[in-house]
Image: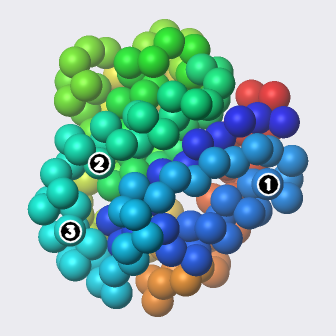
């Protein structure tokens, strides 16, 4: 069993994020999914981004870091889009991370003040034609992780293609993301 803390995307803690977490639990992992929006869920990504900006990205990231304080230091940190901020920050600043899973986004290591920590595996899942055009940033992040980094690109132009509760969910590629995620977690047991 691997301890995983999974952070939601800008639309909030949707049923699709909960379903993803439940698939990980069914596979035998202990998964914590903090609600960084205090119960708010948004109908559109744009509305969720406006909310995140009003609250403040640093405050949301700090709330995620605070939620992880009660988790074992050797957890795997995971995040969807906006949720990559606390996941990546924890991986880069909290010693002991067992691994990091980032879905739909990633930021340069310089955002959190340094390089990628040695020996911390990173796996990133991104649409080839992501509407937020983050491929260059994600490639830079994976390059900084060196041999510990993996990038999987999927034939999609949807941003949140793994969230089964959204219209942009892609049932053809989401199972492949889950399979690779479970393989990653199984190697961290």
Q: Is residue 81 visible?
A: no
- In the rendered structure, are the residues bearing label 2 and label 1 in contact, judged by CB atoms less than 8 Å apart? no
Residue 66 placement (x, y as % from top left):
42, 35
Q: Residues within 10 Å of mark 2 (few under 14, many from 20)?
A: some
Mark nearest the camera among 2 and 1 is: 2
Question: Which numbered marker is on residue 51?
Answer: 3
Query: Of residues 137 and 48, which is closer to you in this image?
Result: 48
Residue denoted by label 1? 25
| Quarter that holds the C terminus | top right
Mark closest to the chain's N terminus, 2 or 3: 3
Residue at (16% x, 70% y) in the render:
50
Query: Of residues 186 and 142, which is closer to you in this image?
Result: 186
Q: Is residue 155 above or below residue 103?
A: below
Q: Is residue 30 left or right of residue 151?
A: right
Mark closest to the chain's N terminus, 2 or 1: 1
Residue at (76% x, 35% y) in the render:
2
Q: Secondary structure at mark 3?
A: helix
CA–CA distance in space, label 2 to label 1: 25 Å
CA–CA distance in space, label 1 to label 3: 29 Å
Q: Is residue 125 above or below residue 49?
A: above
Q: Quadrant of residue 86?
A: top left
| Quarter that holds the N terminus | top right
Residue denoted by label 2? 60
Mark closest to the chain's N terminus, 1 or 3: 1
Residue at (67% x, 70% y) in the render:
19
Q: Quadrant of residue 89?
A: top left
């Amino acid at each position: 069993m691997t301890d995983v803390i999974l952070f939601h995307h800008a639309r909030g803690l949707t049923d699709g994020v909960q379903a993803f977490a439940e698939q990980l639990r069914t596979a035998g992992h202990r998964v914590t999914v903090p609600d960084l929006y205090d119960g708010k869920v948004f109908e559109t990504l744009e509305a969720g981004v406006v909310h995140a900006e009003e609250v403040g990205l640093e405050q949301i990231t700090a709330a995620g870091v605070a939620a992880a304080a009660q988790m074992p230091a050797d957890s795997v940190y995971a995040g969807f889009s906006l949720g990559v901020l606390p996941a990546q920050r924890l991986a880069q600043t909290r010693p002991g991370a067992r691994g990091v899973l980032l879905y739909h986004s990633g930021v340069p290591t310089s955002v959190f003040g340094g390089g990628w920590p040695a020996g911390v595996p990173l796996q990133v899942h991104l649409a080839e034609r992501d509407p937020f055009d983050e491929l260059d940033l994600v490639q830079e992040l994976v390059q900084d992780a060196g041999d510990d980094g993996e990038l999987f690109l999927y034939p999609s132009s949807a941003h949140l293609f793994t969230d089964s509760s959204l219209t942009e969910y892609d049932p053809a590629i989401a199972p492949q993301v889950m399979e690779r995620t479970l393989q990653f977690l199984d190697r961290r047991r």
